[in-house]
Amino acid sequence: MSGRIFRPGADSQSPRYIRAAVCVLLLFLLPFGQAAAQRITQSINSDWQFRKADGTDYSQTPAPATGWEKVAIPHTWNALDVTDDEPGYYRGIGWYRKALRVPASWQNRRVYLYFEGAGQEASVYVNGQLAGRHAGGYTAFSFPISQWLKFDKGAQNEVVVKVDNSPNAALPPLSADFTFYGGLYRDVYLVAANPVHFDLDNHASSGLFVSTPAVSAEAAEVLARGTLVNESTTKRRLTVLTELTDHAGNLVAQQRSSLSLAAGEKREFRQTFAGLRRPHLWSPADPYLYHVTTTVREAGPADAAPLDAVSSPLGLRWYRFDAASGFSLNGQPLKLIGTNRHQDFPGLGNALPDALAERDLLLLKQMGGNFLRVSHYPQDPAVLAACDRLGILASVEIPVVNAITDSPAFFENCKNMQTEMIRQGYNHPSVIIWAYMNEVLLRLPAGLTKDNDAGKAYLARVAALARELDALTRREDPARYTMLVNHGAFELYQQAGLLNISQLIGWNLYAGWYSGGFQGFPDFLDRHRRELPDKPLLVTEFGADADARLHSFNPLRFDKTTEYANRYHQFYLKEILARPFVAGATVWNLAEFNSESRQEAVPHINNKSLLTADRQPKDAYLFYQAHLLKTPFVRIGSRAWTLRSGLAAGPDSLHCRQPVEVYTNQPSAELLLNGRSLGTHPAEFGIVRFTVPFGAGLNQLTARAGLAPPDNVEVQFQLLPTNLASEKWPFTELNISLGDQRIFTDARLNQVWLPEQAYAPGGWGYVGGHPFALPGSGRLPYGSDRNILGTEYDAMYETQRVGLSQFRLDVPAGQYEVTLHFAELEAVPAAEQLAYNLAKPDAAAAAPAKAARRFDVSLNGLLVLSDLGPENGLPPLQAASFKLPVSVRNGQGITLDFNATAGEAVLNGIQVKRVE
């Protein structure tokens, strides 16, 4: 079977193509206070049990009492293994179970199990009987279970759900720069409906579809449609009442229809509200929501008890994309600016409570954003509900990422996903775009090129799938726009015919990060305008990695510093705003997210983002606030960099001068240091730049700008003397990252690692050697991008000085502790070649292993480490450190000698601390 959902009966002869995790559900329900006939919906997230696959089919076999872990839903089995040092994560079957007792009064109801999502495939069993199967990890699904339930008093039911996130060539996504979590990671509900009800078998939708065929400032038309089902044994005369209420609950309009349904009949209904005068329009500035409630009753008295009722938010708005002028909402031009979002959080994986999803949307709104690209898959229903309430326009897509499988099963699964996504999200006024592919030509399958026959055939099949999905989308929802999103290979997508299918084109552009310099970005936008003058465009991704621990006053591409990311975003936003034909842009990404296969400075994390993984703002977030917020705003940049260090400006200086940016939407800003003004300077594109003379200890910064509330930041500064033996400024501690040009801050240990420098008398530094660099990588001219095992300080261990002969520190007499840090970066195994690795493809996924190195280290003439190398003390890609005490006499200082007997000596980091 190649479709999305399997149910027994008509589908019972289909092959069991889905592997899933089995959950035994034992459910206890108390009596409900609602009217007996109305629909009852209740979450059943508590008291589940879980275990990974052990070869037993728990859908048919009585579950043993042992070996099960008690869990609550949402739950994923990959919350922790995607962040450990062992490559890969568990992709297979997991089993869940829970207890279920159903009230006897429900015997005449239609009972459904409703799942908001299960990753990636699921099979559901009730009392040993298969209720249904679902393929795809990001849309909801539901199954009727009444026929297998025991309604006797005290009877216990078992419901088994089997979830599987194993790779499946018939199911997207096939590969992607995010983690494919497994588990019941969204809410699970039990639904009990009257035999007469709105359709519960319509792709897990509400069964009510609300649209706005015509909206203007003067009048609006609203259409409510759906399907009624009569599962009773007799003919029923019914009344369908649809009520439109305002935000306060006041009745605005209503429509009533009468119909008769024979036993077992399903029938569609449509009710139109025409001529709603002077509607209160929905917009990001004023997200006003009406509500539509449709109720079915027995025909007769108006106060007859409802048999079923469903409701939906309603936002009255109209919008348009134009290839020349961009986007307009309610007749007014509006530049769409926002972010992408992934659905995970540290320690939880993707099993998030609704509150965390809602918090993300609030953070986007507080940034001033008006647009969310829900990437790369439909997310928790709480996301679009929050967009509706907060006034955030949205694009939603299915996870056809990187590549396709040319098979009927894959095509059918894609179409089912698209249908589910649209029907489940149809009623959200925030949604303006349905999308269906992302960077689908990023990496062609093995052996294929754009020029060989097999490659051309593959491109044709990708285009065929795109046409099918686009046509399906326009049939399902002709009022919204379709979009296909590409990476920056213009000619490739043009050759494949993918630029003339969807109504909108999205471009993921990273000039100045993955390729070339910044100027490639505006050049690409202008090329689109020239060559596709009738096709509206959005910049659907742009961003640069930013590790909040790394800083540089001379940032370089790929260095992952906050400062390089700042330059990147400042350039990009200016070019976006300068071009009216760019309808909108979404930063990649709102927050850091997990991508298990990534290595680099923070392994398993993609940190192209405006917020850290725990949702703390980076500088770029403040920069966007300065441009997007309408209220007076001022913030001091690098506000999380509250622990700094640096060398004094001179032998007699008590200060170190470092740059600080202030972000504001006011014409100018003033910065004060410990109450003393450093001057007032004009803002340039939302930024005011200052040079701050930091002193040792606490430094209090205050920024003032117009009517904005003042902003305060406290910085603890560790001032280092230029002359280590100076009596004026006693030496205490020094941490140096070798082969590095960045500052690394470790707030947890209260340590700042400074970049290396060459030795000069009276100071400290290396003698000889060169920074390690991957040959031919086309990336940062120093360091590696491999995961260093056994440490959380990968950024420091990924850089080293190679071939040094000495490291010297002219410290005064005293007792010291010297710690040397090493990691073997050359004699290493090959890395998996990923499309997202920063190295150029096939150039430096791993440099060829070189001959084993061996070297000795002497400390002030004493041999302290001997024959260090990959076979002795320095296993490849693993952190190693050695702590060495030393007593220093007057004038002696500290000298470390490195003597290589094979290859070259290396050193990644050094710490020197005075202990007496």
Image: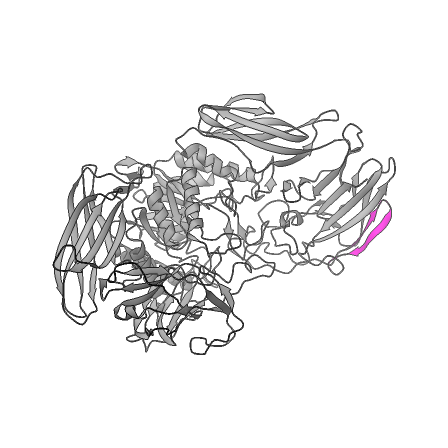
Q: Taking 814 as reference, is 202 left or right?
A: left
The image shows residue 45, relative to residue 429, as above or below, that is below
Prevailing SS of the magenta stretch: strand
Residue 867: in magenta span: yes
Q: Which of the two residues, 901 or 685, is positioned nearer the viewer here?
A: 685
Give the tally of numbered discs. 0
In this orientation, does residue 805 appear?
Answer: no
Q: Which of the two residues, 618 or 110, is positioned nearer the viewer here?
A: 110
Q: Quadrant of residue 230?
A: bottom left
Residue located 86% across and 48% down the image:
862
Q: State the image coordinates of residue 120 (x, y, percent, origin top left).
A: 43, 64
Q: Taking 322 as reference, is 811 left or right?
A: right
In this orientation, does residue 103 appear?
Answer: yes
Residue 865: in magenta span: yes
Give the position of the N terminus as an image quadrant.
bottom left
Q: Quadrant of residue 830?
A: bottom right
The image shows residue 142, relative to residue 912, as above or below, that is below
Residue span colored magenta: 855-870
The image shows residue 615, relative to residue 727, as above or below, that is below
Give the position of the C terminus as an image quadrant.
top right
Q: Taking 910 as reference, is 606 left or right?
A: left
Q: State the image coordinates of residue 777 (x, y, percent, origin top left).
A: 59, 50
Q: State the image coordinates of residue 47 (x, y, percent, origin top left).
A: 45, 64
